[in-house]
């Protein structure tokens, strides 16, 4: 049994492993240059999940004024279905509610059923369909959101789990 995934900041020497997982995970992957450019942006952050000294997953997200927008998220194909994705999603969810950012947003391709099931399992809800979001494949994008109420009667943030489907 591998050691539980530990999610930490991505450092320079993680990038080749991140790019390898990206290439094995997506038909239209980001290149190493795209990762390096994105992670040099002031508001863009890359984190990796590590187990037994190996990078087994990563995520890239952008800090917006009131939200966290997920740009990339993947787990090594050999390391799926034992909680790596969940560990990264939990890390992300812990980053909202502590400050002005109260929601996490992301898009999946319409054919990416595994990702849609994964995000549903993590408490995210589909809120919007953006027609033709992915010109490379002609697919629509499904927007998922995890949002916290600004305040609950207990004074704690709580997830909003309502469906609001709109056409893009
Ligand atoms: C989607 C992805 C990140 C999930 O990562 P993972 O580490 O395998 O996910 P977890 O093991 O934490 O799974 C948590 C839960 O999500 C759901 N889930 C995950 N993968 C699933 C799949 N292929 N089919 C159905 N449900 C799935 C399950 O409910 C699972 O719980 P269970 O294993 O107890 O049934 C991974 O499949 C991946 O990297 N896919 C390719 C890249 C991608 O699509 N990224 C998302 C872009 S938005």
Image (tube, grey):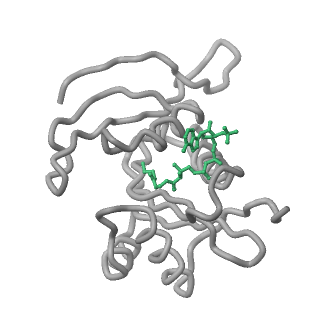
Q: Residue at x 39, y 28 (%)?
A: 126
Q: Position of residue 144 (x, y in %)?
A: 40, 35
For the residue pair 43 and 161, the one nearer the viewer reads as 161
For the residue pair 136 and 151, the one nearer the viewer reads as 136
Q: Quadrant of the C terminus?
A: top left
For the residue pair 34 and 94, the one nearer the viewer reads as 34
Q: Residue at x 41, y 64 (%)?
A: 44
Q: Please identify the residue farthest to the bottom as the structure is shown.
A: 13
Q: Is residue 29 above or below residue 11?
A: above
Residue 138 shown left or right of residue 19 in the figure: left
Residue 136 shown left or right of residue 123 in the figure: left
Q: Residue at x 35, y 17 (%)?
A: 164
Q: Position of residue 148 (x, y in %)?
A: 53, 28
Q: Position of residue 61 (x, y in %)?
A: 44, 57
Residue 73 shown left or right of residue 128 in the figure: right
Q: Please identify the residue farthest to the top as the structure is shown.
A: 153
Number of numbered markers: 0
Q: Position of residue 154 (x, y in %)?
A: 70, 16
Q: Quadrant of the N terminus?
A: bottom right
């Amino acid at each position: 049994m591998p050691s539980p995934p530990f999610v930490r900041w991505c450092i320079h020497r993680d990038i080749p492993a991140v790019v390898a997982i990206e290439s094995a995970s997506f038909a239209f992957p980001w290149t190493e240059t795209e990762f390096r450019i994105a992670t040099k942006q002031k508001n863009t952050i890359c984190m990796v999940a590590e187990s037994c000294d190996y990078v087994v997953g990563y995520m890239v997200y952008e800090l917006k004024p009131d939200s966290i927008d997920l740009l990339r998220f993947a787990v090594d194909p050999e390391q799926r279905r034992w909680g790596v994705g969940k560990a990264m999603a939990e890390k992300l969810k812990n980053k909202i509610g502590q400050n002005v950012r109260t929601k996490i947003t992301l898009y999946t391709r319409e054919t990416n059923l595994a990702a849609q099931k994964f995000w549903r399992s993590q408490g995210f809800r589909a809120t919007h369909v953006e027609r033709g979001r992915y010109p490379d494949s002609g697919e629509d994008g499904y927007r998922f959101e995890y949002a916290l109420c600004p305040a609950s009667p207990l004074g704690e943030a709580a997830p909003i789990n309502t469906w609001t489907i709109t056409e893009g």
